[in-house]
Amino acid sequence: MSETGIVIDGVTKRFGTFTAVDDLHITFADGETACLLGPSGCGKTTLMRMIAGLETPSEGRIIIDGTDVTRMRPRRRNIGMVFQYPVMYPTLTVRENIALPLKRDASLSAAERAKRVDEVLEVIDMAGRAGAFIDELDSGSRQKVAVGRSVARQTKVVLFDEPTTNVEVNAKLTLIRTFKEISRRLRQTAVYVTHDQTEAMTLADKIALMKDGRIIQYDSPATLYRQPSTEFGGWFLGNPGMNFIPVTHTTRGLESPLLAAPVPAPDRLGSGALRVGIRPEQLQAGIEPFEGSVKAEVEDCIVGIAGQLLVRLKVADETVKLKTGKLPGLRNHDTIHVAFPNEHLQLFEDGNRVEERG
Ligand SMILES: Nc1ncnc2c1ncn2[C@@H]1O[C@H](COP(=O)(O)OP(=O)(O)OP(=O)(O)O)[C@@H](O)[C@H]1O
Ligand SMILES: [Mg+2]
């Protein structure tokens, strides 16, 4: 049997001499929600546009549920899409906007169409406003209608490109819940682009982390967060991202002025640059010295949401970020003591994760 879901098979997209998407191989599994996450310009929209058929790959194939759609016209691909600025018809009501894509579907009777629209209105929680004109809605509700319209046809595949960018934060949460609910109910294969890692963590079954037209890692949100395959991944995810501390490989293990004792080194190591990564929330910190601690100077301190302190420290000659709920009243230039617990250290060589011994 041929593979279901969306298979991106060696896809490259060049604009002139510039390569926007570079030999991508990835499968978005049937019925799952995948998020594309990565810095601006890394090729997310270009990939989405190729899946939708709005852009043709320079090389490679795109296969949806076993059918090669690489050269197929967008209409025939049967894909639902929501983009950042959806086209809406202000002179039509909410109900009419959602019903619009169903007009082309000759297989549905008028009654079936009406029923489908009712279902969508219920899912997006807009049944009470079905008669309202688009002009009368706030941006969050308008995006909800756009989502409703894109799912009304119940296509197997839906693409979302930063659909919540222009939506105010509370409405954003409602929208995200709506996406989840809809794709679960309709068992849709969804690809969702976002800049917002919290959004990606909340929504995604799997996250594809992209950089420079390539996929850096494709994993569950938890794995991506806990075991980034690269320093880039550790740095990009997290708020703020991972700390990296250069270490030297000696006969005693991995050493650094920041570590009170050498850390055991894995068996096989190359001759590349070695750094250990640790998340700001994984540091231990105290006012008094403690077992395994080293001295640190507070350079800058800000109170984050939920009362957590975000602290920039100078430790030996390195800048280190600490996130803690334990040291209220900390001030710039204070001296504190921190430790980097062994069990949280992750080793990278030339930016790539060194797997632990099995
Ligand atoms: N039609 C085009 N012609 C030339 N270059 C393009 C074209 N479309 C995209 N690019 C370039 O390809 C690269 C990837 O663009 P893309 O829009 O896919 O990035 P993105 O990851 O979606 O970024 P953002 O997060 O800012 O939306 C960018 O450098 C962009 O300038
Ligand atoms: Mg984009």
Image (cartoon, grey):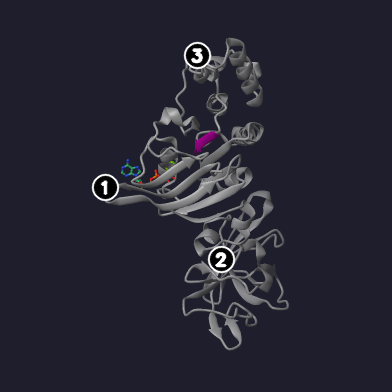
Residue 161 within the segment the image draws in magenta = yes
Instruction: Decide: is 310 above or below 146.
Output: below
Cβ–Cβ under 8 Å for marks 3 and 2: no
Which amino acid, by three-letter code, is at mark 2? Asn
Q: Which residue is mark 1?
A: 16
Label 2 crowding class (10 Å Cα cut-off): few <14, some 14-19, many 20+? many
Instruction: Decide: is 350 above or below 233.
Output: below
Image mark for residue 92:
3
Which amino acid, by three-letter code, is at mark 1? Gly
Which amino acid, by three-letter code, is at mark 3? Leu
Instruction: Name the residue located 60 percent from the left edge and 18 percent from the top edge.
Output: 117
Q: Magenta region, mostly helix, strand or loop?
A: strand
Residue 351 within the segment the image draws in magenta = no
Q: Quadrant of ligand 2?
A: top left
The response on whether ligand 1 sits within 8 Å of label 1 is: yes
Work out whether mark 1 precedes mark 2 in sequence or the reverse, and give the earlier one.
1
How far apart marks 1 and 2 lie (CA) works out to 38 Å
Stretch in magenta: 157-162
How far apart marks 3 and 2 lie (CA) works out to 52 Å
Q: Which residue is mark 2?
A: 243
